[in-house]
Image: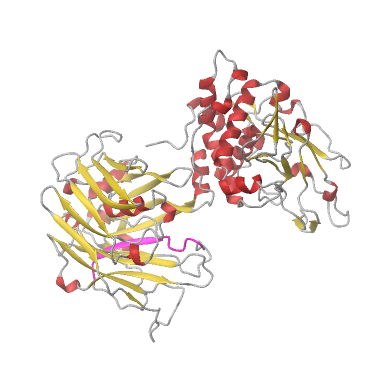
Amino acid sequence: MKPLISFSFAFMTVLLAGCGEESDRLPVDGRDFDGVEYSEAAPYEGRVIDGYLRNARVWLDMDGDGQPTPGPLAITLANGAIHTLENGEPTAMTGPGGHFELDISPLAVNEQVGADLDPRDYPLYALALPGKTQEETSAGEIPVPRAYLMSASPGVSQVTPLSTIARYRALAAERNAPASVTVNPRDYAELDGLNLLEDYVLAGNHRAHAYARALARFSASQMPDSYNDALSQPDADGRVQLLSEDAIFLLGVSLVQNAGAVIETVNNAVVAGDYASVDTDSLVLPDVPLETENPTLVTTVDVFAYADGGGELPVGDSSLEASARLHFDYTAGGRLLSITSQGCLAPDTTELVRLIEADGFMARLNSQWLPAVVLSEQSYARFEEGGLHERWVFDWDNQTAHFDTATHCHAARGVSPDSSELDGTPEIRWSWSLEEGQVVSVEEVINGPAADHTYEPVPAESPAVKLSVPGGAPGFRRSDTAGGTESLLFTPSDQACPPQGTEQDPLDEAGQYITRTFPFTYTAATPFPEALEPLFYEYDVRAYDGLDGAVQRLLRKPFMAPELAALANVDSDDSAFEWLFYYPRLDDAALINDQPNLIDAAFLLDAGTAATCGLAFQARPRSSFARLEYGYQTLSEYLVGLIGE
């Protein structure tokens, strides 16, 4: 699996150092204010450094949003009283030597209201402005070509790329630490023997300076173009609020995550220990796209598909035991790298097509991860062993994917493991062709005697077309080298209808209703039983007041699966199954306003007949073959968790 973090072991040891490992170099110059009395009459001073940066915007971030906030700004004091900063957060432009002075007289509080605000309680931010901020070098002043943002922990007045790493290491530690643990930012202010808070220019520390300049370039590469363009305007002075608090946090976390790779690049360019001669502008740094919108992503799916005591499926919900756990791995840009499972996962080409047309970006799908499932009892046995047993890896740029297994869960598909360990020869490979961003065909090649497959999406009349968003279910034609064929084709006459209440079941608009149906035909060696026709995908598609995103929820998905029905532990007479999907209520306070279609749970049942359009969707079943429970994190939560690992 492609790692998201590429720190060396030694670097990781330092990066994740615990409490009590302070550098004895930290308080050498008073920049962290150890032993220095703060005078209310004096301005709050410091420096902004890549090299020394003149004409950079610097501010005291008192409201925690990482941006210079104008006035009036209300600050809540420790006693609950309100103190208003009429002109907003203290801010200034740096002068020669990167020096700045912030007027903190507005932080004085009427003694009858409360204690004065202390600037050392708040972090500093500094913003290099493209074409305006000047870096002081031995060759003279050089304009900064692209914007980048830096920060320093409360009480630290030197703002540098290295102080930014120190601050966001500490912030990540705070988020990962138990509530009972207090994180001391000082414990994260040293890296590989470097004091991250020092004025490395003044100290003549060429190694730290080379690292800082390369890290600044990396930070600039991740700054959104729209933000950089706005700061490039003639009248722009850095007092803009175009980034969200989440975006600013992601920029800092990404710097921490990728610092190891950046530093390694610098080290590889050093000749005979001469860091001063490294041309950091010519280094090929990691290219890591960053998703600053901070979407919510599915990160785990827990599968319950084993009958308590080893009996037949389906069983009552309380008798289903966990048989697999899927872990979803992402880049800093929110692009899916791989899915790894404890127990077994079921790679599904139909879901692969949805992901391909989203270019691997899970958040572009209205509902994330429409499942397939393994019902083999071997999945439960492996899950109980612990460890990781299967992995599905995606290479979106090269239009390939592969599946590696160390189990015999997929014998019905003709898939046998190459090794008892992962990372051997992939058992299944996929490649695909695109035309104007749409999938034309997918080739599935199985390592062994099993037939290979060709899958061709047929979007006509499908939810993928009718809903006009990525992630609608497509129709398809599938053929294999043994002569087998299968097709699922959507037909015209899809029906839309408003939610309807009944005398027994009054209208509850925040609940799930069947408001759109998409008819389809299915042809295969094992067809749907005639008693189940006509066949429909059932959706809930409607507007709902207060939501930024449209409601477009797949509720019911019938399918044929003879390979599941053939298992000894599965009681199915006709091989017809259906997935039922359940989502948070539309009035749930925890519902994500712009992502309202994230699945909460899915149940696998025997297929039934279609319900009437407009009626409430059925309650969660009490008995099923499998239950899947979805876990989500914001991208920033996911990335911070990786740092904690």
**What residue occupies the far front of the structure in this picture?**
234
Kindly identify the residue that appears in the image at 61 percent across and 47 percent down.
229
Q: Is residue 152 left or right of residue 312?
A: right
Residue 121 seen from this side: yes
Magenta highlight: main SS: loop
Q: Quadrant of residue 170?
A: top right
Magenta stretch, residue numbers:
594-608
- Percent position (x, y) of residue 381? 27, 45
Residue 419 on the magenta segment: no
Kindly identify the residue that appears in the image at 53 percent across and 22 percent down.
267
Q: Is residue 415 above or below residue 163?
A: below
Nearer to me, 367 or 581: 367
Q: Is residue 323 above or below residue 7?
A: below
Residue 178 seen from this side: no
- Percent position (x, y) of residue 416? 19, 40
- Percent position (x, y) of residue 335? 43, 46
